[in-house]
Image (tube, rainbow, N blue to C red):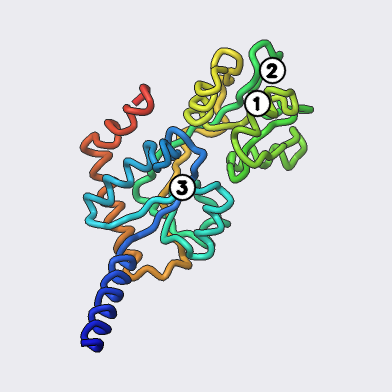
Amino acid sequence: MRSLLAALVLVVTFMAQAVRAQTFTFVSDMDFAPYSMLSQGRASGIDVEVMTEAARRAGVEIEILLRPWDELVRMVKAGECDGAFALFKDEQRQEYAIFLEAVPLHYSDYVLFTKVGTNFSFRSFDDLAGKTIGRAAGVSLGEEFEAAAKAGKMTLRTYPDQASALSGLISDEVSAYAGNIDVTYNRLKTMGMTSSIIYLPKKILEKKPAYVVLSRASDYPEKAEVGQKLERALDQMRRDGTYRDIAHRYLLRF
Protein backbone atom coordinates (compact mmCIF):
# COMPACT_ATOMS: atom_id res chain seq x y z
CA MET A 1 0.00 0.00 0.00
CA ARG A 2 2.80 2.38 0.93
CA SER A 3 4.57 1.74 -2.35
CA LEU A 4 1.31 2.43 -4.22
CA LEU A 5 0.80 5.70 -2.37
CA ALA A 6 4.40 6.69 -3.06
CA ALA A 7 3.91 5.94 -6.73
CA LEU A 8 0.74 8.02 -6.82
CA VAL A 9 2.55 10.94 -5.17
CA LEU A 10 5.29 10.73 -7.79
CA VAL A 11 2.74 10.69 -10.60
CA VAL A 12 0.86 13.70 -9.20
CA THR A 13 4.13 15.58 -8.68
CA PHE A 14 5.25 14.82 -12.22
CA MET A 15 1.90 15.95 -13.63
CA ALA A 16 2.05 19.20 -11.65
CA GLN A 17 5.56 19.88 -12.90
CA ALA A 18 4.47 19.15 -16.47
CA VAL A 19 1.60 21.65 -16.17
CA ARG A 20 3.96 24.31 -14.82
CA ALA A 21 6.43 23.58 -17.61
CA GLN A 22 3.73 24.18 -20.20
CA THR A 23 2.94 27.65 -18.85
CA PHE A 24 4.79 30.39 -20.69
CA THR A 25 5.58 33.23 -18.27
CA PHE A 26 5.57 36.81 -19.51
CA VAL A 27 6.54 39.87 -17.50
CA SER A 28 5.51 43.46 -18.24
CA ASP A 29 5.97 46.92 -16.73
CA MET A 30 3.65 47.55 -13.78
CA ASP A 31 3.87 51.34 -14.26
CA PHE A 32 2.78 51.71 -17.87
CA ALA A 33 -0.96 52.41 -17.75
CA PRO A 34 -3.06 52.16 -19.85
CA TYR A 35 -0.95 49.45 -21.55
CA SER A 36 0.07 47.44 -18.48
CA MET A 37 -0.89 48.11 -14.88
CA LEU A 38 -2.22 46.60 -11.67
CA SER A 39 -5.96 47.05 -11.15
CA GLN A 40 -7.36 45.72 -7.87
CA GLY A 41 -4.31 43.53 -7.58
CA ARG A 42 -4.64 42.01 -11.05
CA ALA A 43 -2.73 42.59 -14.27
CA SER A 44 -4.73 44.70 -16.72
CA GLY A 45 -4.34 47.14 -19.60
CA ILE A 46 -4.32 47.12 -23.38
CA ASP A 47 -1.19 45.00 -23.79
CA VAL A 48 -2.28 42.55 -21.10
CA GLU A 49 -5.69 41.99 -22.73
CA VAL A 50 -4.17 41.72 -26.19
CA MET A 51 -1.59 39.16 -25.07
CA THR A 52 -4.21 37.17 -23.18
CA GLU A 53 -6.41 36.94 -26.28
CA ALA A 54 -3.45 36.19 -28.56
CA ALA A 55 -2.40 33.34 -26.28
CA ARG A 56 -5.95 31.94 -26.27
CA ARG A 57 -6.04 31.95 -30.07
CA ALA A 58 -2.56 30.44 -30.27
CA GLY A 59 -3.42 27.68 -27.80
CA VAL A 60 -0.60 28.75 -25.50
CA GLU A 61 -1.01 28.74 -21.71
CA ILE A 62 0.53 31.95 -20.36
CA GLU A 63 1.05 33.69 -17.05
CA ILE A 64 1.51 37.47 -16.96
CA LEU A 65 3.51 39.07 -14.14
CA LEU A 66 3.84 42.82 -13.65
CA ARG A 67 7.08 44.11 -12.20
CA PRO A 68 9.07 47.36 -12.00
CA TRP A 69 11.07 48.02 -15.17
CA ASP A 70 14.51 47.23 -13.71
CA GLU A 71 13.26 43.89 -12.40
CA LEU A 72 11.65 43.10 -15.77
CA VAL A 73 14.99 43.55 -17.52
CA ARG A 74 16.81 41.48 -14.91
CA MET A 75 14.29 38.61 -15.22
CA VAL A 76 14.56 38.51 -19.02
CA LYS A 77 18.37 38.50 -18.86
CA ALA A 78 18.43 35.73 -16.25
CA GLY A 79 15.76 33.58 -17.88
CA GLU A 80 13.52 33.91 -14.81
CA CYS A 81 10.67 34.51 -17.25
CA ASP A 82 10.12 33.18 -20.75
CA GLY A 83 9.30 36.51 -22.35
CA ALA A 84 8.28 40.11 -21.81
CA PHE A 85 6.34 42.99 -23.36
CA ALA A 86 6.47 45.67 -24.62
CA LEU A 87 10.08 46.64 -25.45
CA PHE A 88 11.67 48.98 -27.96
CA LYS A 89 14.31 47.24 -30.05
CA ASP A 90 17.98 48.15 -29.75
CA GLU A 91 21.31 46.32 -30.08
CA GLN A 92 21.85 45.98 -26.35
CA ARG A 93 18.45 44.39 -25.74
CA GLN A 94 18.93 41.97 -28.63
CA GLU A 95 21.78 40.42 -26.66
CA TYR A 96 19.33 38.95 -24.13
CA ALA A 97 15.96 39.10 -25.94
CA ILE A 98 14.53 37.70 -29.17
CA PHE A 99 12.16 40.24 -30.69
CA LEU A 100 8.93 39.09 -32.35
CA GLU A 101 9.30 41.67 -35.10
CA ALA A 102 6.55 40.55 -37.47
CA VAL A 103 3.79 42.30 -35.51
CA PRO A 104 4.52 45.09 -32.99
CA LEU A 105 2.37 44.91 -29.86
CA HIS A 106 1.74 48.67 -29.98
CA TYR A 107 3.17 51.91 -31.34
CA SER A 108 4.31 54.83 -29.18
CA ASP A 109 4.54 58.58 -29.65
CA TYR A 110 6.89 60.49 -27.34
CA VAL A 111 6.72 64.24 -26.71
CA LEU A 112 7.90 66.89 -24.29
CA PHE A 113 5.56 67.80 -21.42
CA THR A 114 5.88 71.25 -19.81
CA LYS A 115 4.05 73.30 -17.22
CA VAL A 116 1.36 75.65 -18.46
CA GLY A 117 2.70 79.22 -18.74
CA THR A 118 6.29 78.13 -19.24
CA ASN A 119 8.09 80.01 -22.00
CA PHE A 120 9.19 76.87 -23.81
CA SER A 121 9.25 76.13 -27.52
CA PHE A 122 10.54 73.03 -29.28
CA ARG A 123 11.01 73.11 -33.04
CA SER A 124 14.48 71.53 -33.13
CA PHE A 125 16.96 70.17 -30.62
CA ASP A 126 18.80 73.50 -30.73
CA ASP A 127 15.82 74.93 -28.78
CA LEU A 128 16.76 72.67 -25.86
CA ALA A 129 20.12 74.38 -25.27
CA GLY A 130 20.57 75.05 -21.57
CA LYS A 131 17.47 73.03 -20.66
CA THR A 132 17.26 70.01 -18.35
CA ILE A 133 14.99 67.28 -19.66
CA GLY A 134 13.62 64.55 -17.44
CA ARG A 135 12.84 60.98 -18.43
CA ALA A 136 12.00 57.70 -16.70
CA ALA A 137 14.58 54.92 -16.40
CA GLY A 138 14.62 52.44 -19.26
CA VAL A 139 13.13 54.82 -21.81
CA SER A 140 14.96 55.06 -25.12
CA LEU A 141 14.12 58.29 -26.93
CA GLY A 142 15.72 57.53 -30.28
CA GLU A 143 19.09 58.08 -31.90
CA GLU A 144 18.54 61.75 -32.76
CA PHE A 145 17.56 62.67 -29.21
CA GLU A 146 20.41 60.68 -27.66
CA ALA A 147 22.91 62.21 -30.08
CA ALA A 148 21.71 65.71 -29.20
CA ALA A 149 22.09 64.95 -25.49
CA LYS A 150 25.56 63.50 -26.04
CA ALA A 151 26.51 66.64 -27.97
CA GLY A 152 25.52 68.72 -24.95
CA LYS A 153 22.48 70.39 -26.51
CA MET A 154 20.56 69.60 -23.32
CA THR A 155 21.08 67.97 -19.93
CA LEU A 156 19.28 64.70 -19.29
CA ARG A 157 18.03 63.76 -15.84
CA THR A 158 16.83 60.18 -15.40
CA TYR A 159 14.29 59.31 -12.71
CA PRO A 160 13.50 55.82 -11.39
CA ASP A 161 9.91 55.99 -12.63
CA GLN A 162 7.31 58.18 -14.29
CA ALA A 163 5.78 59.47 -11.04
CA SER A 164 9.10 60.83 -9.76
CA ALA A 165 9.89 62.33 -13.17
CA LEU A 166 6.59 64.22 -13.19
CA SER A 167 7.25 65.37 -9.63
CA GLY A 168 10.56 66.72 -10.89
CA LEU A 169 8.73 68.67 -13.58
CA ILE A 170 6.19 70.08 -11.12
CA SER A 171 8.95 71.16 -8.72
CA ASP A 172 11.00 72.74 -11.55
CA GLU A 173 13.89 70.30 -11.25
CA VAL A 174 13.57 69.87 -15.01
CA SER A 175 12.32 72.16 -17.77
CA ALA A 176 10.35 69.40 -19.52
CA TYR A 177 9.59 65.72 -19.27
CA ALA A 178 10.02 63.41 -22.27
CA GLY A 179 7.29 60.80 -22.11
CA ASN A 180 4.83 58.58 -23.93
CA ILE A 181 1.71 60.61 -24.78
CA ASP A 182 -0.83 57.95 -23.78
CA VAL A 183 0.94 56.82 -20.62
CA THR A 184 1.83 60.29 -19.34
CA TYR A 185 -1.61 61.74 -20.08
CA ASN A 186 -3.19 58.81 -18.25
CA ARG A 187 -1.05 59.55 -15.19
CA LEU A 188 -1.81 63.29 -15.35
CA LYS A 189 -5.52 62.51 -15.51
CA THR A 190 -5.33 60.45 -12.32
CA MET A 191 -3.39 63.31 -10.71
CA GLY A 192 -5.97 65.89 -11.83
CA MET A 193 -3.27 67.87 -13.64
CA THR A 194 -4.29 67.75 -17.31
CA SER A 195 -4.89 71.50 -17.26
CA SER A 196 -1.60 72.27 -15.48
CA ILE A 197 0.79 70.28 -17.66
CA ILE A 198 0.61 70.15 -21.45
CA TYR A 199 2.66 68.56 -24.20
CA LEU A 200 4.34 70.34 -27.10
CA PRO A 201 3.19 69.49 -30.65
CA LYS A 202 6.55 68.38 -32.10
CA LYS A 203 7.14 64.70 -31.44
CA ILE A 204 10.44 63.25 -30.29
CA LEU A 205 9.40 59.81 -31.53
CA GLU A 206 6.42 58.97 -33.73
CA LYS A 207 4.87 55.50 -34.09
CA LYS A 208 7.84 53.81 -32.46
CA PRO A 209 7.10 50.05 -32.41
CA ALA A 210 7.18 48.15 -29.12
CA TYR A 211 7.48 44.38 -29.29
CA VAL A 212 6.88 41.13 -27.50
CA VAL A 213 10.23 39.48 -26.73
CA LEU A 214 11.40 36.00 -25.75
CA SER A 215 14.16 35.55 -23.19
CA ARG A 216 17.28 34.03 -24.75
CA ALA A 217 18.14 32.53 -21.35
CA SER A 218 14.75 30.84 -20.90
CA ASP A 219 14.85 27.04 -21.09
CA TYR A 220 11.21 26.75 -22.20
CA PRO A 221 10.97 23.96 -24.79
CA GLU A 222 9.92 24.90 -28.34
CA LYS A 223 10.20 28.60 -27.49
CA ALA A 224 10.51 29.65 -31.12
CA GLU A 225 7.33 27.79 -32.04
CA VAL A 226 5.43 29.61 -29.28
CA GLY A 227 6.70 32.92 -30.64
CA GLN A 228 5.50 32.07 -34.15
CA LYS A 229 2.05 31.09 -32.89
CA LEU A 230 1.72 34.35 -30.96
CA GLU A 231 2.85 36.42 -33.96
CA ARG A 232 0.19 34.80 -36.14
CA ALA A 233 -2.48 35.46 -33.51
CA LEU A 234 -1.41 39.10 -33.08
CA ASP A 235 -1.50 39.62 -36.84
CA GLN A 236 -4.99 38.14 -37.02
CA MET A 237 -6.16 40.43 -34.20
CA ARG A 238 -4.87 43.50 -36.05
CA ARG A 239 -6.63 42.42 -39.23
CA ASP A 240 -10.01 41.53 -37.73
CA GLY A 241 -10.29 44.63 -35.53
CA THR A 242 -9.91 42.88 -32.18
CA TYR A 243 -6.88 44.97 -31.25
CA ARG A 244 -8.77 48.20 -31.99
CA ASP A 245 -11.77 47.07 -29.93
CA ILE A 246 -9.58 46.27 -26.90
CA ALA A 247 -7.59 49.50 -27.15
CA HIS A 248 -10.74 51.61 -27.56
CA ARG A 249 -11.91 50.55 -24.09
CA TYR A 250 -8.88 52.36 -22.67
CA LEU A 251 -8.16 55.09 -25.25
CA LEU A 252 -10.85 56.93 -27.20
CA ARG A 253 -8.44 57.68 -30.07
CA PHE A 254 -8.74 54.09 -31.31
Q: Which label sits in the foreground, 3 or 2? A: 3
183 relative to 142, above or below: above
**Sequence-first disc among 3 and 2:** 3
Q: Nearer the viewer, residue 223 or 91?
A: 223
The structure residue drawn at horizontal position 30% and vertical position 53%, both measured from the top left corner, is 230
Left-right relation of 156 to 138: right
Q: Nearer the viewer, mark 1 or mark 3?
A: 3
Residue at which label 2 appears: 120
User: 159 or 6, which lies in front?
Assistant: 6
Of pointers 1 and 3, the one earlier in the residue sequence = 3
Q: Quadrant of the N terminus?
A: bottom left
Amino acid type for the residue under numbered disc 3: Leu
User: With 98 as the anchor, is 56 left or right in this view?
Assistant: left
| Distance from Cα at disc 1 to Cα at disc 3 | 36 Å
User: For mark 3, what is the residue?
Assistant: 66
Q: Tag 1: residue type? A: Ser
Question: Label 2 sits on what residue type?
Answer: Phe
Q: How far across and down, in percent of the image, does residue 223 sit?
A: 35, 65
Q: Identify the residue position indicated by label 1 in the image.
A: 124
